[in-house]
Amino acid sequence: MKREHTYTVVFDRDEDGCFVATIPALGVSVQARDRSAALRRLGEAVESYTQARKARGWPIPRESENVISTLKVAV
């Protein structure tokens, strides 16, 4: 039976303007030309990642109770 997990996704842009989508709790990242493609690829990557962990008998990491904030800095 599959259990549903919710994870925080962080989007950044690389030097070429591509989107980099990362799930920090899993350490999984992908890159794509647009945000929706990055999210789709991230879903595929997480599926592979979780299948590999299950095959080895390893637990699937859970989202921690991270707090995300911003900080203004004068440069």
Image (cartoon, rainbow, N blue to C red):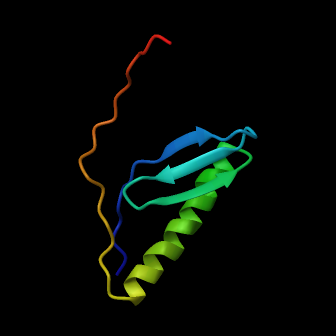
Q: Is residue 1 above or below residue 17?
A: below
Q: Is residue 55 left or right of 36 when viewed as pictured?
A: left
Q: Which residue is drawn at 50% across and 12% down?
A: 75
Total marks in image: 0
Q: Position of residue 31 (x, y in %)?
A: 66, 53
Q: Which residue is drawn at 28% across and 37% down?
A: 67
Q: Where is residue 48 in the image (x, y as percent from the top left)?
A: 53, 75
Q: Is residue 69 left or right of 75 when viewed as pictured?
A: left
Residue at the outermost left position: 65
Q: Residue at x 33, y 72 (%)?
A: 60
Q: Residue at x 46, y 82 (%)?
A: 52
Q: Is residue 18 left or right of 49 when viewed as pictured?
A: right
Q: In this view, does 59 lie above or below 22?
A: below
* Residue 68 occupies quadrant: top left
Quadrant location, the N terminus:
bottom left
Residue 72 versus residue 6: which sits nearer the camera?
A: 72
